Image: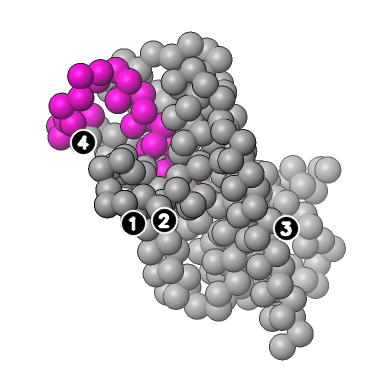
Amino acid sequence: MLMLLAQSRVEMLRMSRNVYFIFWSLMMPVAFYFLYTRIFTTGTTDSEQWNAHYLMSMTCFSIMGSSIMTLGIRLVQERAQGWVAYLQVTPLPNSIYFGGKMVGQTIMHLFSIFVIFTAGFLINGVSLPPAQWIGSALWILAGSLPFLALGTCIGTFRRVDTASGLSNALYLSLALLGGMWMPLDIMPSWLRQIGNWLPSHSFGNGAWVIIAGGVPALRDILLLAAYLVGFMLLSTYIRNKQREA
């Protein structure tokens, strides 16, 4: 346990100094939130509901980006620099290495949620019952697991530039098609059909439902669970094949 805590602490320190984390997970979502709630308004009759809705969208956007890009690219960098090979000759088990990353990433996710929720309050005075603040935060933390698993898949790449390009494309595509930038209702029907089956839409939809006073749909929970298992199996399969090569 002490070894896991120490490894998690190191991961948090490294992440807090990571430019990708600062930009993609904090600055960009807050900037988008300000732009699309204060500058480019939608003309909706219920601005309070829209401000809360878009706050959840940008929080999910932040956490998804941190999971896919920060974790995935860092894994590739460490392997390319020989850090992973070095750790294999130390007493540190692989389970502690990956566990420390997951724990550290989750704690930093909590920090990101707090920062963006605070930004929503300061920018637009978003006010929700405590149960909805806590419920949406817990949902976002739990819903990030499939994207962390996707990040470990990205981490199997051997070249940093390849991993960076693919993770950028996946991240932005999932955000757009999942309805985080704009509601799926205003998209063409064929894009709505695709978006409804993406993990990003189920991720955001759970938070949107919570702040509307409901509970996440079973479909969204099962879909995220299926993606989590699928990405974990894919990551494990690729790593096993790479060890055999």
Is 54 part of what is drawn in magenta? Answer: yes
CA distance separating discs 2 and 4? 27 Å
Q: Quadrant of residue 75?
A: bottom right
Taking depth in this image into account, of 96 and 227 the one nearest to the observer is 227
Q: Of label 1 and label 4, which has the lower sequence position? A: 4
Mark 2 element type = helix
How many numbered circles does the render carry? 4
Mark 4 element type = helix
CA distance separating discs 4 and 3? 39 Å
The image position of residue 236, as x and y in percent, is: 71, 68
Q: Of label 2 and label 4, which has the lower sequence position? A: 4
Q: Of label 3 and label 1, which has the lower sequence position? A: 3
The answer to whether the residue labelled 2 contacts the one labelled 3, judged by CB atoms less than 8 Å apart, is no
Disc 3 or disc 1, which is closer to the eye? Answer: 1
Task: Determine if residue 137 is in view.
Answer: no
The image shows residue 47, relative to residue 172, as above or below, that is above
The answer to whether the residue labelled 2 contacts the one labelled 1, judged by CB atoms less than 8 Å apart, is yes
Mark 1 element type = helix
Q: Which dot marks residue 35?
A: 4
Mark 3 element type = helix
The residue that mark 2 highlights is 194
The residue that mark 1 highlights is 190
The image shows residue 61, relative to residue 228, as above or below, that is above
Q: Of label 4 and label 3, which has the lower sequence position? A: 4
